Every structure is written in C-alpha cells, then in structure tokens.
Amino acid sequence: MKLQPVALDERIDAIDMMRGFALLGIFVVNMLAFHTPFSYIDSYSFFEAPADRAAFKYIDVFVQTSFYPLFSMLFGYGLAIQFMRAEKRGQAFLPLAVRRLLVLLVFGMIHAFLIWYGDILITYALLGFLLIFLLRLPAVALLVSAILIYAVPHTMFLLASYMAATSGAPFYTGIEEVISSYEAYAQGSYSDIFMQRFADWYNTNNLGNALFFTVTILPYMLIGAAAGKLRLIEQAKRLWKLWTALAVIGLGAGLLLKFLPFLWQADYFTQYLQDFIGGPLVAVGYAAVIALLAQNVYIHKLLRPLAKTGRMSLTTYIAESVIATTIFYSYGFGLYGQIDVVTGTWMAFGIYALLVIFAELWLTRFKQGPLEMLWRKVTYGTKKSTPSGS
C-alpha cells in the first residue's frame, strides 16, 4: 500500500499554530543577521543607540534561542505522528521518510548556498535521518535519550563557559569577518556575495559546530517525538493541568534565566544559561500557552491565521529569506548595515504580516503552499495540486 501525505482533515490546528508562531520568532532573530554581521559581533556591546540596545534586550530574552527549539520539537512531533499513522495503516514508513528528508536536504542546500547562509533545513534533514531510526523507541525511552544526549555534553559546556567567565575572557568579535560581510553584502557583486555566504555558512557549520548542533537540536526533536507518541497536543484539553504546569515552569524559570545577562552580568556563563537552559524552557512555555489557548473557541479563531502560515512553513521560511536578502543585499536594495535594530524588527513583523495574508489568500484556493506542493510532487510523485474547491 502506498503511503500518502497527511490529509487536510487529519491536521492538528494547534501544531500549525505553534509552527506559525515559531516562524515569526525565528524571523525576528534572523532579521538581525540579515542586515548586520550578527554571527561575528559581541551583541551586548555592538548596538550603541539606547533604542537599539533596548530592542535587542527584549529580542534576546523573549525570542532568541526559544523559537528554533520550539520548531525542532514540532519537527520531531510531526515525524512521530507520521510514523504512528503509517504503522496503524500497515504502511512502510522508512522509504517515504527518507525521500522526504532527501527533498528537504535539497531545499536546504538551495537556501543555504543561493539565498542565505543561516539555513536550518540542512541540519533538520541530516538529524532527521538519525531520528527516523529512533522512532520505534517508546516515548519514555525517547525522552530519556533526549535528556542524556543533552545533559552530558551541555554540562561540560556549561562548566567550560563558567571557567571562561571567571577568567574574564571577552566575547568574540571577528573584525575581519565583519568588514568582509559589509563589503560583500552591501557593495559586492553576486559572486562576492556567494563567496561570503559560503564562508559564513562554513563558519557556522564546521565540524565542531555540527557536533554541537547534534547534541542540541536532536534532543529537542526527540522530546517532540516523545510528546507526539503520547499525543500531548491533541489531548491538551484533558491534560490541561500538565500543560498549565509546563507554561508556568517554562516561562517562569526560563525567562528568569534569560534575563540573567541583564540582571547580573553578561559573560559566557550567564549567556550559556540564558541560551541553552532558559531558551528551551521558554520554548516549552510558549508551546504550552498556545496548546491551552487553542482550546478556547474564540481564541482558536483568532489564531487560525497563524495555523495557515504554519501549514505553509516551508514556503514562509524560504520567502522570509528571499524578501530580506533582496532588501538588504547589493543585488537588491543594498540596505545592509544601514538600518537599526528597531527598524529591522518592525520590518520583520511587517513582512511576516504580509506572508500571513498571502497564506490566507493562497489556501482559500489551494490545499498547500507553493513549495509544499512542489515537495509533495517530488516526494510522492502525485499530480499537480488542484484548487481546493475542485
């Protein structure tokens, strides 16, 4: 029997709402890297204007390192649901999952090397190949594996960050890389931009960072897969006490940790606590809040635009990069390095609002987003999608 994609009536609105919300947060953070050499600066001292420093503070606390963990957990949740549905129907899951991940890998490579270096799709695809072989484990085993994979190396990293902080080590700033970024993205040819983009991608995805991503993002995916096996989101109404506890603990403890660099001092130790303990806790808190709000009929209707954007997550994610690089890179409007944090943040919200409207209009006629339709056609070999009213 041939395995088919998830039918429209099988979709879970709360998951799509979380995914749409995550895409907004990811874009707000990514916007900093679209118009500044964010990967190479000390972000606590680079922004000088009071308004920019305030804007960065709130992005750092409420957004940074909290939305890609949420998206990673949803990635694992979705794969677990697909696996369980395939088992229930007696269908082969592995061949299709491999094809889906291969197609995702191709999209990621196009995105990373031709559009923007900060791509996450390649990482998701490669770690997805590890995840699909672990999905036969029960939920408890997935959760324990996630904790062990995360806790052991991150405890060592946390100790290293403490030693760096006590030694007074300053935050890294790559002066040469900053200058090169300005020259390429603001004034260079497409060839210059391509070379800079590749260098930035390599600096972000070298072997050391690849291993770091593995012990960071894979556990998030495993946590999501465990939650998917337990169908926690679908049972949010019945499990409201659990979700309420996750919201209170996640946001309470998570936000406290994320404020540490501003309440105490900004060093490697407080930044590590902020990003890799506080960040995922806040991600769980955000997921819990949406899971609970989605149970209310009126709020559910208000959040439906987020759900539609989440249904078009691949299209939305790539479109964000295409629009932003066109605005900031020299082959477009060439505004790289010319706007402040406040303006860039408002631009992110504005662009995202337009993409929400686009998703609303597109999905009134078609069942999937443009790139989702292409992905489906390549993966399943189906005919071109028809309008939903057909």
Image (cartoon, helix red, strand yellow):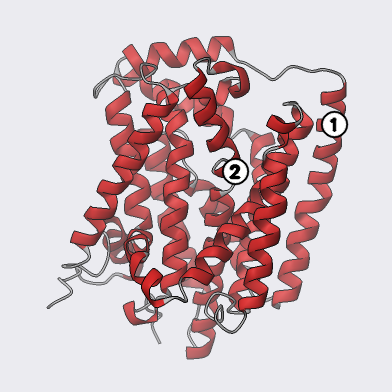
Q: Does residue 331 sit above or below 176 in this rendering?
A: below
Q: Does residue 10 sit above or below 52 in this rendering?
A: below
In the image: residue 63, left or right of residue 359: right
Residue at 15% from the left image edge and 71% from the top image edge: 387
Q: For the residue labelled by badge 1, is the local secondary structure a helix, a strand or a loop?
A: helix
CB within 8 Å, label 2 to label 1 = no
Label placed on residue 65: 2
- The 10 Å Cα crowd at callout 2, few under 14, some 14 to 19, many 20 or more, is many
Q: Is residue 10 visible?
A: yes
Q: Label 1 belongs to which residue?
A: 162
- The 10 Å Cα crowd at callout 1, few under 14, some 14 to 19, many 20 or more, is some
Q: For the residue labelled by badge 2, is the local secondary structure a helix, a strand or a loop?
A: loop
Residue at 50% from the left image edge and 26% from the top image edge: 200
Label placed on residue 79: none
Q: Does residue 273 sit above or below 198 in this rendering?
A: below
Amino acid residing under circle 1? Tyr
Q: Name the residue nearer the viewer: 159 or 352.
A: 352
Q: Is residue 211 visible?
A: no
Please identify the quadrant where the N terminus is shown.
Answer: bottom left
Amino acid residing under circle 2? Thr
